[in-house]
Amino acid sequence: MNSSPLPPVIEITENSDKTSESENENIDSNEFYKSQDEVEIEIMPEIKFSLDSFSEEKANNSAVRIMELEQALQTENWRFQQEIFNMNQEYHSTISHMSMELDIYQTKTKIYRKQIEEMKKELEITKKNLIEEQQIRKTLEEKILAITVNSEEKESSLLALLEQRDQDNFQQRTENEKLQKRIEELNDELSNRKLMKQESHSTIGMSITDSMDADFLKTNESDSSKEISKKFADPIDIALKEQLAKLNLHGHFRKQQSNVYCYGNKKVYIILKNGKLLCRCGIGFQAFDDFIKNANFKANSSPPKVVHRRSNTASGDLHKIHPEFEPGNGYSPDSSKMHLKNRVGTPLLGSSNSSKSLRK
């Protein structure tokens, strides 16, 4: 490594040391020479020689001392320069390392800022989605509430309908049991009549008995048919006919199927609860009178016209399709099968076949 020149401070220090030493030597020599000039005459040559040798030796010692000081000064200067150089190297390495860390920090900062911006955008999107989900949830809750209310209303209507159906079925079973007992009694009575005819021997008695039996059977047949028709008649049709008769609105209702009636182009579901008619056209039941008022019926209005014969046959008004409403007629849609069964299984009371069989 090449040694650089000494700093100005060090040079000033060395010059000052040299100057001080040379000045001291000059002062001593000047004083010596002055004293020598003053006593030159008195000094002997031997003393003069000794003084010269002393001054020369002292000069040599001073030169050696100066060289040693210069060498020590150069060594110290080199050591100081080496320390400065090492510190400089350390500082440079530290600065370069910190520069690299600063670059890495700046790079990471850019990446983090970019990620923060992306996260902010995602947060905004999440907030919007959350608001939309809350609105959708609120809408769904409102719809669920409406459906719940509607389902409760329908459930109450269905429960009322089921209760009415159960009551109707129970009444129907009771009436069927009574009718069955009545039929059995009539069959027993017919059997007894046959036995009585077989035991009679006189022709006159037989003719009288035949005429009496025929009259009795005809009477019983008409009474039983009326009783059966009355038992199997739909109580809703009967109550509806009575209400229409009170309001003079015959023909406005046409029965389509069980509990379903047509009014114009609308279908009305009618049930009988606690002896009162309840109508449902849409949601919820209402009393028959309220339904008539809401439907804006007019008293004495003309019934709707039916053009096709088949429509009259299939769904005509209460007078045509259900003749059980007419007094003295025992037809009923629900009881027609039982009538046919009775006609097939047992002979009708008062018929010609039964009278012939009795005569035999």
Image (spheres, rainbow, N blue to C red):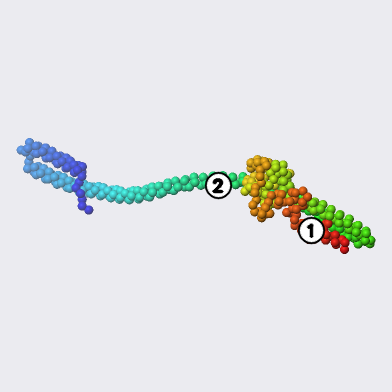
Percent x, y of residue 214: 86, 56
Q: Is residue 217 left or right of residue 151?
A: right
Q: Tell me what residue is drawn at x 70 percent, y 44 percent.
A: 244
* CA distance for labels 2 and 1: 59 Å
Percent x, y of residue 192: 89, 58
The residue to which callout 1 is attached is 342
Percent x, y of residue 142: 56, 44
What kind of residue is marked 1?
Asn
Q: Nearer the viewer, residue 2 or 211?
A: 211
Q: Which of marks 2 and 1 is in front?
A: 1
Percent x, y of residue 133: 51, 47
Crowding at dot 1, Cα within 10 Å, few <14 / some 14-19 / many 20+, comes out as: few
The residue to which callout 2 is attached is 140
- The C terminus is located in which quarter? bottom right
Outermost bottom residue: 360
Number of numbered discs visible in the structure rendering: 2
Q: Tell me what residue is drawn at x 83 percent, y 61 percent.
A: 353
Residue 276 seen anywhere in this rendered image of the structure: no
Query: Dot 2: what SS?
Result: helix
Query: Dot 1: what SS?
Result: helix
What kind of residue is marked 2?
Leu
